[in-house]
Amino acid sequence: MRFNKFDIGAEIIAILTRGMYPDPKDALREYIQNGVDAKSTHINVKIRQNNIIIQDNGFGMDYQTLRKAARIGVSDKNPSKDVGFMGIGIYSAYHLCDKLTITSKKEGSTPNRLIMRFADMKSTLSEQRVLRLSGEIDGDRVIDLQTLLETFVDITEPNEMSDQDFPTIGTRVELAGISEYFYSEISNIEITSKYLQDVLPLKFNANNFSYAALIEEKINDACKRNSSYFESVNVTLQVNSQTRELYKPYSDTDFHNNHSEGEPHILEIKDDDFFYGVVWGCLNSERRKIKNSDLRGFLIRKQGFAIGRRSSAVKHFPRGNTFFDRYIGEIIITNPNLLPNASRNDIEYSFMRERFFNALLTCTTEFDSIGNTFQENCKADSVLNDLIEKVKEISNKVNTKLQNSDELLILYTKLTTYKNTLSDRVKSKRIRDTRMEEAKELEQKVISLMSFIQERISINVNKKTGNSQKAQKK
C-alpha cells in the first residue's frame, strides 16, 4: 500500500504535542534539554510579558542542523548520548504560545533563524474543524501535515543573517504570545522553580546542602572508573523582576543528619557485564518520614533529567515505603543503552531494561538494610538510654533503703531483669557499635550494684539475727 502526504492529517501535531507534553512547563524542559545536549554550561531562562526566552551557550546550529530540527519524529541526536532524540520536542510549545522563534549560531558559520507560527496553525485547524462539523468539507479535503508546516514554518536562507544580528555562539529560543491560561502558572517563580529543579540536571547548592561536594565527587568518580559520564548545567531563571539561580532542591533543613547514618550512601548500579549508573541517598536520622513530601524518596534520572515521579521508584524497594520515605536521593542512569520513553515517565523497553532493574534491586535492598539497621540501632539506643536512667534511679534509692531488706530485694529483682536485658543485647550485638563499651560498663555497674545489695541484705539479716539472739538471752 502506498501513502502520500494527504494520508497524514495536520491534526496529528496537536495530538502528539498535547499527549506528550500535558504540562505547559514541559516545553521549558524540552528547550533547556536541547541546550544541555548542545553541551551548554549555562542557560538563562527569562519569563516576562507573555514571552519566554531561553538562551544557552552550547555549540549552536548551522543552517542544515536548524533545518533538520523542524522535522517531526526524526532526529539526528544520538540517543546513547542525548536525552532528547524523539524529534518532537521542538513542537512542545505548540499549545503554549503563538509563535516560536529559534536563532542559533555555530562556530565558523553565520547565524540562522527558524520561525514557527503556531497561532496560525491552530487557527487553520480550528476553522477546518468547524467546516467538518457543518459538513462543508470531508476528510479528503482536510489540510495535510506537510502543507501545514510548509505554510507556517519559515527559515532564513543561508548567509541571510550576519554576525551582527546574532553575534554569540549558542541558541536563543523565544516563545511569544504565551496563552494567558498558561502564563499565570509559568510566571509564578515558585511554581516554575520547583518544576525545573525536579526535572533538570542541575548542580547541588553547596551553601545549603553539606553533602553537595561529596555526592558530586563520588558520582563523577564512579562514572570515570566505569568509562561513563555525568553532566550538570547552571540555570538562571528570571521571572519579571525576580531572578534566581537554580540548583537541585536538597538542603540540610529537609532532613535530620545528626548521626553517621544521615551521611550519603552512594552505590554503583552494575552487574557482571554493565555499569548502569549511580544511586545516592541520605537517610533521615530520625525514625520518621522526610518532612518535605516533594523530596521524599528516590527520583530516577537519565543524565540528570527526571523520569517519572519519586513515588514511581518505590516499587523497586523490597520493603516498599517502610524506609523509602525516610530517604532523600536519586537513581542516576548514565548507561547509553537505557533511554526514557517518549513521555519521560519510565524507562523505554529494551533488552537492558530488565537487567538494569535487577542490578538496581541489589542497591535498593542495601538501602533498605541500612534503614533497618538504623531503626534497630535507634531501638537499641532507646533501650540503653532507658536502662541508664532506671539504673541511676535504683542507685539513688539504694542509699535510702539500706535498712529495709524487703525494699532492697525489690530493687535487686529489677536489677536482675536489667542485667539480663543488657547481657542479651551485648551478646547478640543488638547495641550500636559506638555504644557497646557504654553498655558493657553499665552491665558491670548493675552487677556491682547487685553485689552491694546482696551484701547489705546479708548485713541486715545478720544484724537482725544478732538482735534476736540478744533479746532471747535477756
Image (spheres, rainbow, N blue to C red):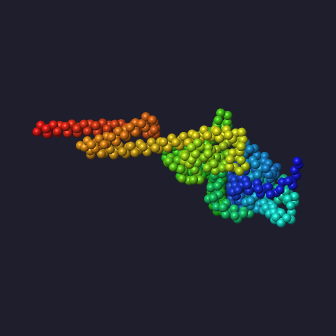
Q: Residue at x 59, y 53 (%)?
A: 294
Query: In the orientation shown, which residue stands out farthest toward the top?
Result: 272
Please name whichever residue, 431 or 318, is drawn nearer the observer in this view of the structure.
318
**Residue at point 14%, 39% (across, down):** 471
**What's the residue at 29%, 41% (across, down)?**
409
Residue 89 location in percent, x, y?
A: 74, 52
Q: Nearer the viewer, residue 177 or 326?
A: 326
Q: Position of residue 371 (x, y in %)?
A: 53, 43
Report if residue 418 is visible in the image: yes
State whether residue 236 is above or below residue 221.
Answer: below
Give the quadrant of residue 176.
bottom right
In the image, farthest residue toward the bottom? 134
Classify residue 187 as left or right of residue 398.
Answer: right
The quadrant of the image that shows the C terminus is: top left
Q: Outermost residue, left direction?
A: 474
Q: Is residue 231 left or right of residue 396?
A: right
Nearest the eye: 50 or 321: 321
Residue 132 placement (x, y as % from top left) = 83, 63
Residue 57 point in image, percent of width and height: 71, 51
- Residue 266 in view, yes or no: no
- Count the marks: 0
Q: Is residue 32 left or right of residue 398?
A: right
Which residue lies at the image location 71% right of the left edge and 39% below the top edge?
351
